Amino acid sequence: MNLSRRFTEYYNIKWVLRTAKSSLICRALLKYGYSKFKLDILEYCDPSDVIAREQYYIDLLKPEYNILQVAGSLFGYRHTEEALAKMKEIALNRSEETKAKLREAALGRTFNHTEETKIKHYVREMLY
C-alpha cells in the first residue's frame, strides 16, 4: 500500500543488496540489471480494496517474481507473543563469549569496497 516505500526500496542498491538473499526479485535485479525490469502502477484503489485488487492481478498476470500466490498472505502479519518471547530469550541467553565475538565482528568491519565491487561479489556469490 505504501508506493513511495516500494519505489524507494527497489531503487536503493543498499536495500537490494541486503534483501537479495531472501528476495527473488532483488536477486534478479542484481543479475539482469534494472534496464530489464519496469515497475508500473496498475491501478489506484481504496485501501480497503487493495488485497482483492492485488489478487485479481496475481491471477490475471501470473507474475514470475511474485512467490506468494495469495494476496495479503503476509499483510499485517505479527509474530505471536510466544515467538517474540522465544527470540528475546535466545538473544538474552547468549554466552559472554558469543556476545564478545559478535561485538568484535561488528566493530572490526571495514567497508572500503566500492558499491560496484560489492555488487560484483554478491552476484558472483549468488550465481555459484
Image (tube, rainbow, N blue to C red):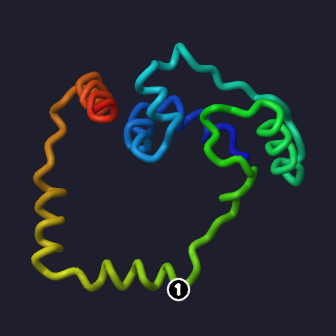
Image quarter of residue 101 = bottom left
Q: Is residue 10 above or below residue 75?
A: above
What is the secondary structure assignment of the residue under circle 1?
Answer: helix
Image quarter of residue 61 = top right
Task: Name the residue at 88% across, 54% down.
Answer: 48
Image quarter of residue 100 = bottom left
Task: Name the residue at 44% across, 36% down.
Answer: 16
Q: Quadrant of the C terminus?
A: top left
The residue most toward the front is 128
Graded by Cα atoms within 10 Å as few (under 14), some (14 to 19) or many (20 or more), the crowding at tag 1 reads: few
Task: Name the residue at 42% across, 31% down.
Answer: 13
For the image, the number of numbered tags is: 1
Location of residue 46 in the rendering, given as x and y in whole percent from the top left corner: 89, 46
Q: Is residue 127 above or below residue 79?
A: above
Q: Is residue 36 left or right of residue 86?
A: right
Location of residue 79 in the rendering, given as x and y in whole percent from the top left corner: 57, 73
Task: Name the residue at 58% across, 79% down.
Answer: 80
Location of residue 114 in the rendering, given as x and y in whole percent from the top left corner: 23, 26
Seen from the viewer's position, the closer of residues 119 and 104 is: 119
Q: Which residue is mark 1?
A: 82
Seen from the viewer's position, the closer of residues 2 and 28 is: 28
Q: Is residue 91 left or right of residue 84?
A: left
Q: Amino acid at mark 1?
A: Glu
